[in-house]
Image (spheres, rainbow, N blue to C red):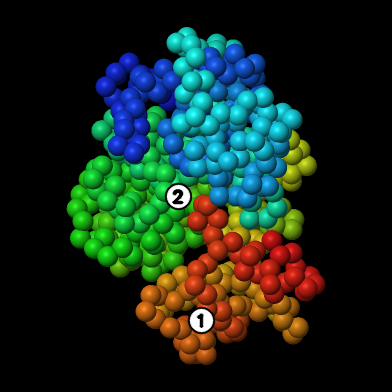
Amino acid sequence: MSFRLTDVVRRHASATDLVALTFDGQNTTYAELDRRAGLAARAMAADGLGAGARVVWLGKNRPEFFDLLFGAPRVRAGTAPLNNRLTHDELIAIIEDSAAPLVVLGPDVADLRERVGSIDAVRRVLVVDDDYEAWLTASDEVLDPPDHAQDDDCVLQLYTSGTTGLPKGVVLTHTQFAALLSVGDHWGFDTESVGLVAMPLFHIGGSGFALVCMSFGARVVLVADIVPDQLLATMADEGVTNAFLVPAVLQFLVGVPGAADRDWSKLRAIAYGASPITSTVLNRVLTTFKAPLFQVYGSTETTGAITQLDPEDHDPDGPRAHLMRSAGKAYPWVELKTVDPATGEDLPTGEVGEVWIRSSQVTPGYWARPEETATALSDGWFHTGDAGYLDDEGFLFLTDRIKDMIVTGAENVYPIEVENVLSGHPDIADVAVIGVPDERWGETVKAVVVPREGSTIDSDALLEWCKERMAGFKRPRSVDVIDALPRNASGKILKKDLRKPYWENAEGRHIG
């Protein structure tokens, strides 16, 4: 029989003392997690859930999510974890979109119970620390995985981060995870590994990384809230060997006083990705943790990582230092190319175009969105919307999102290039570059910067500083100084929010 998501836990359940999860000082073994998944499946079946159904999880990271994740496939259903940081109206709209008959709420969002219960498709709403455990343990009968499950059964439905419009449900099946779990072979996992899952479980960097850890029988240290000094302490105290963190979190961690003085000798690998990282932050991570770094590139639609930059290519002072600006090479089971976004024609080495991906990791489509599925997928190729190029060795260099590219006059400017330069300024803690309307050039480059603590930034002086460091058409023509950049739950900067005040009444560009 083909791979099934339930195999991730069941293959380790016979080792009765092997710990699967550590959360808030409490351990759950693989045997216990397998039992709880069977109980959850039995309860779902009793509620009439079957093939094609969705089960919504809404709340901060908690172990109960894994009851649902490994239980739902036993009735051929899938779990849809939602972003608890969205507004209540947004969450209600997404739950309606999922048509989920069962919704489980964490204690942090228990106040949504009544509104969720009023949704037509919802048959039952449960709240952790209220009635969830009673539902789970109403019988001691467990349901085993079915023999008739299909490779294309949806097992996880992740909603895109929604930087533009209502998030779309990305359907991920047994097939996609069969491919993804192979990446763990590259990161030194075994049953002695301790994986940090601090990214939210509604993000592929949270749920996907947890599944990679568990597929090797590793112990997952689950964290509900990212508080930099507490997270550093957890990593050290729990003996974390492997972690996946987005650049924004890495930047917070290396900024904690004394971070580099801790003992990080147990760290085998830190994988990072999900948004661009500046050279300055990357160098600080290397000097702080002194651990092998793996840059990975992917998306929700690709079930996470599809390229990797190896530790030996993270050498800022070596002859191949330029590779630190790349996203690495595609995994052996992934096809990668760049195309002209207007025509779809393949582009030669070194020429910037839209990145397209073909692999068994690529989603079969968006839930109940046939038109958007057809737009994003053609002949098995996923159109990422990312701009980049391949060098003659096959390394992928990302320049930006196609929609974030700034066209000033006849020149294309990719914000990450400008952001990399600005991040080297001693008084800048964080930076984003956007295009703003200009009567003469169509749009010009604007820098939005956050000063380091105790520093001030003079806009005119910064513009002069830029003149010596980048081409004239790339240089910012204006600077905004703000306290913090707007980010979504994945750590991605919400550039649409930064652009909006300038483009609301302008013609010729979509704000998103």
Q: Position of residue 382 (x, y in %)?
A: 64, 44
Residue at image position (35%, 56%) is: 228
Residue at image position (48%, 47%) is: 307
Q: CA distance from mark 1 to mark 2?
A: 28 Å
Residue at image position (79%, 70%) is: 508
Residue at image position (45%, 10%) is: 140
Q: Nearer the viewer, residue 27 or 265?
A: 27
Q: Is residue 99 left or right of residue 73?
A: right
Q: Which residue is mark 2?
A: 296
Residue 330 visible (yes or no): no
Q: Nearer the viewer, residue 377 or 85?
A: 85
Q: Quadrant of the C terminus?
A: bottom right
Q: What's under tag 2, amino acid-wise?
A: Val
Q: What's under tag 1, amino acid-wise?
A: Met
Q: Is residue 247 left or right of residue 231?
A: right
Name the quadrant containing residue 502: bottom right
User: Which one is earlier in the sequence, the residue at label 1 or at label 2?
Assistant: 2
Q: Do the residues bearing badges 1 and 2 touch, measured as CB atoms within 8 Å?
A: no
**Considering the numbered disc 2 on the image, is that residue within a helix, a strand or a loop?**
strand
**Considering the numbered disc 1 on the image, is that residue within a helix, a strand or a loop?**
loop
Q: Position of residue 133 (x, y in %)?
A: 47, 24
Q: Position of residue 462 (x, y in %)?
A: 48, 86
Q: Position of residue 306 (x, y in %)?
A: 50, 44
Q: Which residue is mark 1?
A: 470
Q: Nearer the viewer, residue 375 or 353?
A: 375
Residue 104, compared with residue 197, is above or below; it is above
Residue 188 visible (yes or no): yes
